[in-house]
Every structure is written in C-alpha cells, then in structure tokens.
Amino acid sequence: MKKLTLLLGLAVLVFGSWTPAFAYNLWGYQWSSTSISYECDMHGDYTTQCENGKNDWNRSTPVNLTYGGSNAGITTTAGNFGNVSWSGLCNLSQVSGRTILKADIQINTHYTDSYSSLQRKGVITHELGHAIGLAHEDSLGRGGAVMYSNDGRTVYSPTRDDIAGVNAIY
C-alpha cells in the first residue's frame, strides 16, 4: 500500500507540474511596437483571407495589426509568379539593426488560385507570422504550427506554439 501511495504521489508530482515544451523559431527581428500597420492589396477571397489571418493574430497575440493604407509597414499582394518553389513569400525589405521597418508579402496565385479558402488563409497567416518575426517550425509536423514550412500544413490559424513564439518576441 505504501508503494502504491508513493507511486501515485510521484505521478501527481511529475505530471501535475508538467508544462508543454514549445518549439517555435524566431527570425531574430521584431517591430518596435506591437501596433503594426498592414495593407492587403489583393482582391476577392484573398482580401477576405488576409483579414481573417490578421484577425487571428490580433485575437491570439499582443500584436495589433491595423490598417495602414499605402504607408503600411506590412504590404501583402497577390500575383502569378509562375511555377516557382513558393506559394507565399515574406521579405523583410527594410530593417534597422534587429528592428523591422517594412515587410512585403507576396502570394503566388499560380498555386493558390487552386487552393480552398482555408488553405489560402493558411498561406497568408503563415506569411503574416514571418512579417511579425516568426521563422519556420517543422519539428512539430504539419499539424503543429501555422509556421510549418510548406503547404502540407493542416492548421490554418496560429497554434499554441505560434502564439508562444509571438509572446516571446513581444
């Protein structure tokens, strides 16, 4: 009986104090403020999914992406860039030291025109994650993070791991 009590007590101690490990990766860059202006210069469902991705990051992290028009810090455009190796691309086009001043996101409609709305949202949300400072996270597998590095991801909104990464930055 003492062994069982000791074993149960040990199990409660070990598992009761367990906290999940996170695997997020950071680019090493961040904005000077959590309030970041953005512009989605796209059309139709692309604009809708850009708004949905922006809302996901705003709801789940300290980041507040706000409409900034033509002077926005983050600009997102969609176009047919052909049969290349990417469906979405984020370029930190202007930095000062480790501070992001401007980020440009391009969505490649050559691929994404055939995606579902949810898949498009996943690509845009992923690229917005780069624009706010997250790098790829593949160790959790395709269902572990929106920052998974290819379109085989099965999540389309920030996960606990993605959120923990942004919280670590800001």
Image (tube, rainbow, N blue to C red):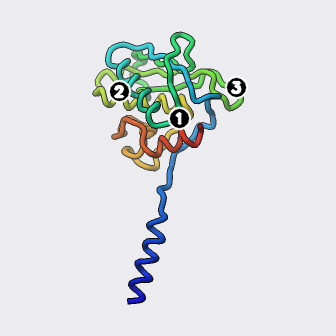
Q: Nearer the viewer, mark 3 or mark 1?
A: 1
Within 10 Å of disc 3 (Cα), the crowding (few <14, some 14-19, many 20+) is: few
| Residue located at (36% from left, 39% from top) | 155
User: What is the quadrant of the N terminus in the image?
Assistant: bottom left
Residue 115 spot, x, y in % from top left: 30, 27
Residue 113 can be seen, yes or no: yes
Q: Secondary structure at mark 2?
A: helix
Q: Nearer the viewer, mark 2 or mark 1?
A: 1
Residue 42 spot, x, y in % from top left: 40, 14
Q: Could you tell me how far apart the alpha carbons at marks 3 and 1 are, in whole angstroms?
A: 22 Å
- Tag 2: residue type? Arg
- Vertically, is 17 above or below 32? below
- Quadrant of residue 54 within the rendered picture: top left
- Vertically, is 162 above or below 64? below
| Residue with the mark numbered 2 | 120
Q: Could you tell me how far apart the alpha carbons at marks 2 and 1 are, in whole angstroms?
A: 24 Å
- Tag 1: residue type? Pro
| Residue located at (47% from left, 70% from top) | 14
Q: Hey, which residue is sitting farthest bottom in the picture?
A: 1
Q: Which mark is residue 75?
A: none
Q: Hey, which residue is sitting farthest right in the picture?
A: 97
- Choose the circle earlier in sequence order: 2 or 1: 1
| Residue located at (62% from left, 32% from top) | 30
| Residue with the mark numbered 3 | 96
Along the line of sight, which residue is nearer the eye, 91 or 76? 76
Along the line of sight, which residue is nearer the eye, 99 or 109? 99
Residue 72 spot, x, y in % from top left: 55, 16
Q: Secondary structure at mark 3?
A: strand
